[in-house]
Image: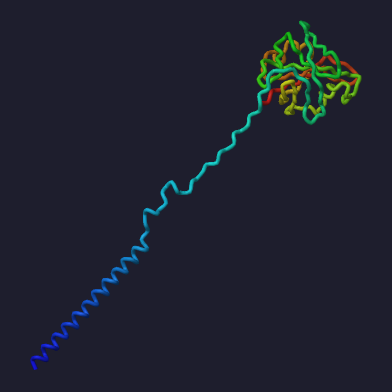
C-alpha cells in the first residue's frame, strides 16, 4: 500500500512540474510578444524630420519702383497743353540785349534764350533757371485760327492744374500750370514773380487777346516741373 502511495506522489510531482513549465513558457512568450508590439509602435526619433527639412517660408521680393528718367538740358522742339488742342512747334530766339520781346512769327512758340531781366535756362528735369516761352496773338483773327495758335490761350479751356508737355531734343518734360494772369505789360517788366532765376519754373508769355482790338496787357501762364 505504501508503495502505491509513493508512485502516485511521484506522478503528481511530475505533473505539477510540467504545468509550471508550460505556464512559465506561455508567460515568457506573452511578454516577448507584448514587448515586440510596443516596439513596433514606438516612433524612431531618428526619423523625425530635422529643422532643415521643414517647409521653407519664402518672403516675396517686391519689385523696385521704376524712376522716371532724368532729362538733361536741351532746346525744346514742341509744346502742348493737354485736353485743349494747343500743340505748337518751338524754336529759339535771342533778345541780344533788347528788353522788348518780339517773337519772329505767329505760327510758333519761341524759347527766349537770353532774358535780360533774369536767367533763362534750357528746359530739363533739373533746370538751372526759369524757362521762358513767348508767342504772338492776332486780334484780327479768330481765337481758334490755327495760323495763330496762341490766340486760344485766353480761352477758358486753358486752366490751372492742366499739364504742359514740353518736348526737347533730349526727351519729354511735364509741367503743371499753377497760375494764369493778365498783367499790364509795363508793370510786368519789373515784376519779380516773373523775372528771376527759378529752377523748375516755366513762364509762357503772349499778348492778351481781345478780338478786334489791341490791349496794353499780356497773358502770363506759370507752370512747375513735375518730376
Percent from the top left, x then y, of residue 173? 71, 24
Q: Is residue 112 left or right of residue 51?
A: right
Question: Residue at image x 37%, y 53%?
Answer: 46
Quadrant of the snapshot with the N terminus:
bottom left
- x, y (%) of residue 103? 82, 13
Instruction: Say which of 194 and 136 sits in front.
Output: 136
Residue closest to the far bottom: 1
Q: How many marks?
A: 0
Q: Residue 29 occupies which quadrant of the picture? A: bottom left
Residue 81 falls left or right of residue 32: right
Vertical side of 25 occupied by 120: above or below: above
Q: Residue at x 78, y 23 (%)?
A: 79
Q: Is residue 69 above or below residue 93?
A: below
| Residue 215, above or below 40 | above
Q: Quadrant of residue 18?
A: bottom left
Q: Which quadrant is the C terminus positioned in?
A: top right
Amino acid at each position: 500500500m505504501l508503495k502505491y502511495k509513493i508512485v502516485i506522489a511521484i506522478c503528481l510531482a511530475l505533473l505539477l512540474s510540467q504545468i509550471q513549465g508550460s505556464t512559465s513558457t506561455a508567460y515568457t512568450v506573452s511578454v516577448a510578444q507584448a514587448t515586440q508590439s510596443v516596439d513596433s509602435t514606438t516612433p524612431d526619433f531618428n526619423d523625425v524630420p530635422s529643422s532643415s527639412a521643414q517647409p521653407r517660408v519664402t518672403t516675396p521680393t517686391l519689385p523696385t519702383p521704376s524712376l522716371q528718367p532724368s532729362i538733361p538740358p536741351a532746346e525744346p522742339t514742341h509744346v502742348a497743353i493737354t485736353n485743349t488742342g494747343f500743340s505748337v512747334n518751338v524754336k529759339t530766339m535771342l533778345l541780344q540785349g533788347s528788353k522788348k520781346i518780339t517773337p519772329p512769327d505767329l505760327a510758333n512758340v519761341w524759347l527766349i534764350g537770353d532774358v535780360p531781366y533774369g536767367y533763362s535756362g534750357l528746359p530739363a528735369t533739373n533746370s538751372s533757371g526759369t524757362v521762358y516761352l513767348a508767342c504772338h496773338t492776332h486780334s484780327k483773327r479768330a481765337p481758334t485760327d490755327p495760323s495763330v495758335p496762341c490766340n486760344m490761350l485766353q480761352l477758358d479751356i486753358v486752366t490751372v492744374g492742366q499739364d504742359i508737355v514740353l518736348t526737347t531734343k533730349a526727351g519729354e518734360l511735364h509741367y503743371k500750370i499753377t497760375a494764369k494772369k493778365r498783367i499790364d505789360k509795363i508793370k510786368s517788366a519789373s515784376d519779380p514773380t516773373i523775372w528771376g532765376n527759378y529752377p523748375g519754373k516755366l513762364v509762357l508769355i503772349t499778348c492778351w487777346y481781345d478780338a478786334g482790338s489791341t490791349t496794353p496787357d499780356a497773358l502770363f501762364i506759370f507752370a512747375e516741373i513735375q518730376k
